């Protein structure tokens, strides 16, 4: 075996035990075949010892506890052992990289490491495994798996002090030998050589490490950031951190619950609060990551950075502390873990389990993202990040990513002139105002349509559109090619959508952001005014993008889209799509040309909504009148179930609620009126401002009721306004989302309750005339006679 695998070490271990010298030939021990299955990680051009370190951490438990059971789970002792072994094996690697979740899951590939799924967690496990790239965070490992056990062979070997010592020496030596071989076979590993011919900007490697689709992705999770010196280069303080700090600092302050989706930034906010309490500067790096519980004695405050990491046997003690009011707590948790803790211990708060669950759900469902939660005499202030708009925060992070100071090191690099990453960054920097506005308009369009992304997902996507996931070896390969690839393949306006302009990047499709973008079909809807201008061959107009570095490429794509010039391997459709993307992100549109942006985003009213933001924004009389007419038209159609031509009801401003079958394929010429209101006097269109707990505010159009229907409001968000405008322009194929049908029906029911004609001794019918206007008639029985009168 030594001849076929020369990097393996054949050695004899001499161990002294009870005055007897015993020699163990590990190479002839069956353990060898098993232990050699432990593999290193390759990350950021380094050979990483995660699996070796975790195995040695388990061995230490056998050393420290002679009666150790073959039953292991993630706790503080195992994590401390893991970090200790990690630093010993790889002192050159900052130990912040020593995340335990990766080896804890992947050691099962060795065949001696067995993960045991908790009862009732099989479906959750299967859901994760069905993803393109299954990923188990520490939180998920604790939540899904009860424990890990070792094979009987390994368990017995580690209980014997003789073989245990031999195993420790073999595993340690084996790691260093495997590392040496990897470095010999793959010379680029470990190279961050400064100076000429090298890729010297470590910030690029950091950006790649934020992308979970890549190999070096250890910084994709917040837990790894607290001790990373690069973290401050993109970190933006969350406004909620100061709010939480102030609440916990008050003498009569409440406990704070911070919840949200995975990736919303809960752990980062907890870190910010910890720094505020301990007087640590925002940009300073911690020597050690936050422990599951951090106590700030000076303020009598405790921070539990992840409630799922708590020891459940101590729940009763935790709840007693919460009730005692001797100290205040910041509890960071997802919804399920929080409900699990409070429901299972409802007796502590003298409350019914169902009632207490309802209280918690109401608190975390608050529209503003903030609510108070009172459980008997214990009071909480609840913040739900999933309910807050995080786009401004993401924009500030991206501005830090593209800051010139981050990219100074690139200018002295040999590969700089042909480096797609640096060309990309320069392109964005030189057109920063347009690019940032247009990127975040896309995100805003998705947000308004209910596609909410987390800060982690935004950061991952933004770092990808800068680097395309390229590393030093990729850039060097491009530099050395005699026939270089089209630079367009790597530029942000293509990578934003997860492709190179022609074909999708398989690794990018693993990102939720990319998958969501693909479904929106941005830029696929043709816009006749611009299509003629861009593609007609006989057009005398010479159109320029206005970006000097791309004007030539833009013109070639235009000619290819017009089938005058041919790019090999690219269809005319792909060329036209790239031209639209370049136009959207980079072109300086005049005021009368902004319809191109609306068309690209499939949203006629998003730019209008954006113009309404700000405390000084007001609707002009003309805009208000025009919008009211269009909104009235669509609501009247919905309430009567009749398709009405545009302008047919302009002389009748009454809103009818009728008894109809709501079937558009059946003409319902006469309908009984259940209620009517005068649109002109009973309904007003207003811009209403709402504020979130994070300090963000927004203004939305709201139909506000007056007189009989006072305090009955209907918020009009972007999807509804888009539907209104598309119906106005004759796009009858457009379908309103189910959620908005439900809101309209609720509004209809509220109006009907207030304005019902049920108490009258006559009924009204409305008849649809040939000109699509309504004729109103009253029907009443007087002295056994039917009276019919027209209503003016």
Image (tube, helix red, strand yellow):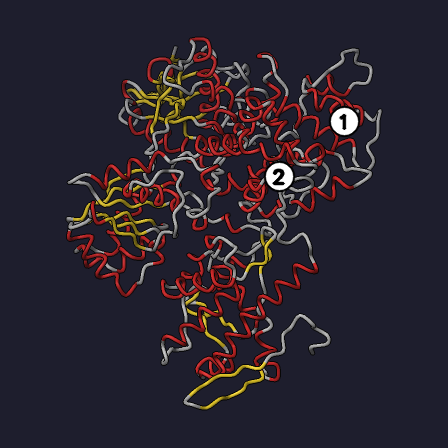
Mark 1 residue element: helix
Q: Can you say whether 729 is above or below 378 in the image?
A: above
Residue 585 appears in view: yes
Q: Residues within 10 Å of mark 2 (few under 14, many from 20)?
A: many
- Label 2 belongs to which residue? 467
Mark 2 residue element: helix
**Closest to the observer, 643 or 85:** 85
Residue 597, image x and y in percent?
Answer: 59, 22
Q: Quadrant of residue 410?
A: top right
The nearer-to-camera label among 1 and 2 is 2
Q: Residue at x 50, y 30 (%)?
A: 399
Residue 666 appears in view: no
Which quarter of the rendered picture does the C terminus lie within? top left
Disc 1 to disc 2, C-alpha distance: 23 Å
Q: Residue at x 60, y 27 (%)?
A: 428
Give left or right: position of 149 versus 734. left
The mark tally for this picture is 2
- Label 1 belongs to which residue? 557
**Closest to the observer, 286 or 401:** 286
Q: Can you say whether 319 is above or below 743 in the image?
A: below
Q: Residues within 10 Å of mark 1 (few under 14, many from 20)?
A: many
Give left or right: position of 439 versus 66. right
Q: Residue at x 46, y 16 (%)?
A: 627
Residue 678, image x and y in percent?
Answer: 36, 16
**Closest to the observer, 661 or 231:** 231
Residue 23 — which label?
A: none
Which quarter of the rendered picture does the N terminus lie within? bottom right
Give left or right: position of 108 versus 69. right
Residue 148, image x and y in percent?
Answer: 45, 70
């Amino acid at each position: 075996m030594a001849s076929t695998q020369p990097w393996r070490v054949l050695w004899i271990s001499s161990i002294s035990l009870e005055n007897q010298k015993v020699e163990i030939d590990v190479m002839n021990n069956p353990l060898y075949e098993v232990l050699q299955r432990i593999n290193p990680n390759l990350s950021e051009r380094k050979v990483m010892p995660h699996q070796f370190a975790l195995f040695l951490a388990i061995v230490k438990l056998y050393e420290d506890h002679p009666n150790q059971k073959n039953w292991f789970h993630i706790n503080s002792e195992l994590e401390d052992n893991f970090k200790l072994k990690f630093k010993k094996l790889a002192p050159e690697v900052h130990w912040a990289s020593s995340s335990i979740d990766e080896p804890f899951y992947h050691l099962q590939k060795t065949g001696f490491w067995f993960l045991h799924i908790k009862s009732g967690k099989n479906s959750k496990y299967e859901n994760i495994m069905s993803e393109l790239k299954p990923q188990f965070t520490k939180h998920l490992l604790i939540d899904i798996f009860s424990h890990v056990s070792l094979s009987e062979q390994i368990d017995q070997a580690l209980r014997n002090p003789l073989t245990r010592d031999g195993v420790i020496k073999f595993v340690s030596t084996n790691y260093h030998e495997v590392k040496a071989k990897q470095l010999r076979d793959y010379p680029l590993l470990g190279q961050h050589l400064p100076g000429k011919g090298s890729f010297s900007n470590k910030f690029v490697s950091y950006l790649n490490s934020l992308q979970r689709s890549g190999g070096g992705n250890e910084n994709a999770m917040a837990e790894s950031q607290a001790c990373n010196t690069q973290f401050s280069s993109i970190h933006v303080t969350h406004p909620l951190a100061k709010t939480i700090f102030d609440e916990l600092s008050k003498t009569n302050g409440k406990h704070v619950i911070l919840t949200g989706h995975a990736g919303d930034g809960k752990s980062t906010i907890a870190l910010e609060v910890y720094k505020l309490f301990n007087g640590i500067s925002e940009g300073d790096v911690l020597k050690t990551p936050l422990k599951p519980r951090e106590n700030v004695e000076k303020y009598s405050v405790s921070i539990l950075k992840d409630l799922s990491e708590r020891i459940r046997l101590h729940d009763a003690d935790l709840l007693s502390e919460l009730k005692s009011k001797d100290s205040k707590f910041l509890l960071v948790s997802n919804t399920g873990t929080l409900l699990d803790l409070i429901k299972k211990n409802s007796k502590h708060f003298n409350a019914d389990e169902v009632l207490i669950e309802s209280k918690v759900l109401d608190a975390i469902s608050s529209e503003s993202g903030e609510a108070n939660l009172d459980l008997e005499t214990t009071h909480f202030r609840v913040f739900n990040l999933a309910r807050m708009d995080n786009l401004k925060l993401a924009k500030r992070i991206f501005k830090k990513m593209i800051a010139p100071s981050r990219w100074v090191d690139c200018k002295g690099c040999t590969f700089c002139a042909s480096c797609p990453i640096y060309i990309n960054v320069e392109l964005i920097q030189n057109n920063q105002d347009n690019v940032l506005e247009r990127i975040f308009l896309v995100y805003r369009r998705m947000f308004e349509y209910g596609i909410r992304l987390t800060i982690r997902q935004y950061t991952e996507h933004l770092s990808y559109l800068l680097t395309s996931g390229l590393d030093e070896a990729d850039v060097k390969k491009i530099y050395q090619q005699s026939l270089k690839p089209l630079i367009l393949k790597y530029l942000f306006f293509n990578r934003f959508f997860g492709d190179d302009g022609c074909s999708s990047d398989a690794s990018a499709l693993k990102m939720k952001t990319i998958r969501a973008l693909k479904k929106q079909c941005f830029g696929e809807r043709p816009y006749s005014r611009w299509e003629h201008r861009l593609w007609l061959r006989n057009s005398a107009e010479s159109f320029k993008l206005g970006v000097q570095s791309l004007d030539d490429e833009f013109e070639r794509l235009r000619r290819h889209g017009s089938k005058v010039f041919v790019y090999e391997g690219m269809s005319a459709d792909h060329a036209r799509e790239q031209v639209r993307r370049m136009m959207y992100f980079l072109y300086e549109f005049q005021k009368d040309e902004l319809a191109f942006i609306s068309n690209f985003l499939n949203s006629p009213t998003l730019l209008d909504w954006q113009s309404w933001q700000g405390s000084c924004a007001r609707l002009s009389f003309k805009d208000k009148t025009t919008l009211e007419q269009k909104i009235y038209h669509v609501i009247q159609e919905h309430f009567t179930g009749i398709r009405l031509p545009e302008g047919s009801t302009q002389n009748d401003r009454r809103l009818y609620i009728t008894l109809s079958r709501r079937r558009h394929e059946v003409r319902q010429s006469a309908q009984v009126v259940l209620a009517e209101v005068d649109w002109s006097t009973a309904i007003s269109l207003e811009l209403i401002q709402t504020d979130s707990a994070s300090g963000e505010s927004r203004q939305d159009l709201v139909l506000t009721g007056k007189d009989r229907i006072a305090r009955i409001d209907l918020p009009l968000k972007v999807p509804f306004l888009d539907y209104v405008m598309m119906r106005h322009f004759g796009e009858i194929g457009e379908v309103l989302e189910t959620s908005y049908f439900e809101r309209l029906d609720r509004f209809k029911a509220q109006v009907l309750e207030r304005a019902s004609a049920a108490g009258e001794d006559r009924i009204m019918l409305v008849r649809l005339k040939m000109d699509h206007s309504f004729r109103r008639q009253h029907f009443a029985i007087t002295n056994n006679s039917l009276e019919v009168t027209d209503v003016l």
